[in-house]
Image (cartoon, rainbow, N blue to C red):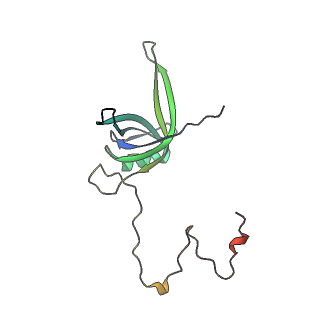
């Protein structure tokens, strides 16, 4: 039987990230994420429910989190669920479900105020040059310049 393990979350960090390194030199960072959900109950009243999720980041993603994120920073996480199981000193079995991050996106502006400076967003825009005589013709939707007289007609494109 086929299986699918994908988690997509957006929330705020519950603590400052702390990066550590494995003996092999790989960066690893465990963060806490608070994800809020607002629902209208059967009585018509709005209730807010917060879910706390532990997330593990690896490699360069862990280093970026440690450098740019802080408590309260908004972040988008995409990854997979992982179940860790262990036994306590008293012999009791324990387990914990957490997310292993495969992709992280910082959300919000670059400012130092607000939610802790989440970073991310779009890169700064270049200054526009209004002298159109020196500019190349505008690009198409895919970033390619328009085809000149020697281009391939659209009917010949195989897709």
Q: Which residue is drawn at 35% across and 38% down?
A: 39
Residue 126 lies, in percent from the top left, at: 41, 72
* Residue situated furthest top in the rendering: 90
Q: Residue at x 42, y 12 (%)?
A: 90
Q: Which of 20 and 126 is in front in this view?
A: 126
Q: Is 55 situated above or below 106?
A: above
* Residue situated furthest left in the rendering: 113
Quadrant assignment, res 47: top left
Horizontal relation, residue 93 to residue 114: left or right: right
* Residue situated furthest front in the rendering: 43
Residue 31 lies, in percent from the top left, at: 39, 38
Residue 60 lies, in percent from the top left, at: 48, 48
Which image quadrant: the N terminus?
top right
Determine if residue 154 is in view.
yes
Q: Is 49 situated above or below 73?
A: above
Residue 142 lies, in percent from the top left, at: 57, 67
Which image quadrant: the C terminus?
bottom right
Q: Which of 82 and 66 is in front in this view?
A: 82
Q: Residue at x 39, y 47 (%)?
A: 75
């Amino acid at each position: 039987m086929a299986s699918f393990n994908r988690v997509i979350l957006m929330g705020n960090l519950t603590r400052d990230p702390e990066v550590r390194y494995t003996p092999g030199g790989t960066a690893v960072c465990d963060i806490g994420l608070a994800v809020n959900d607002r629902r209208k109950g059967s009585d018509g009243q709005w209730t807010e429910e917060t879910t706390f999720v532990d997330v593990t980041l690896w490699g360069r993603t862990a280093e970026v989190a440690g450098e740019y994120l802080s408590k309260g920073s908004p972040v988008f996480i995409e990854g997979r669920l992982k179940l860790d199981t262990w036994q306590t000193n008293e012999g009791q079995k324990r387990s914990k479900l957490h997310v292993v991050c495969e992709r992280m996106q910082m959300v919000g502006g670059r400012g130092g105020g607000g939610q802790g400076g989440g970073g991310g967003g779009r890169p700064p825009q270049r200054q526009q040059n209004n002298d159109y005589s020196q500019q190349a013709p505008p690009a198409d939707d895919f970033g390619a310049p328009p085809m000149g007289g020697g281009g391939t007609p659209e009917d010949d494109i195989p897709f």
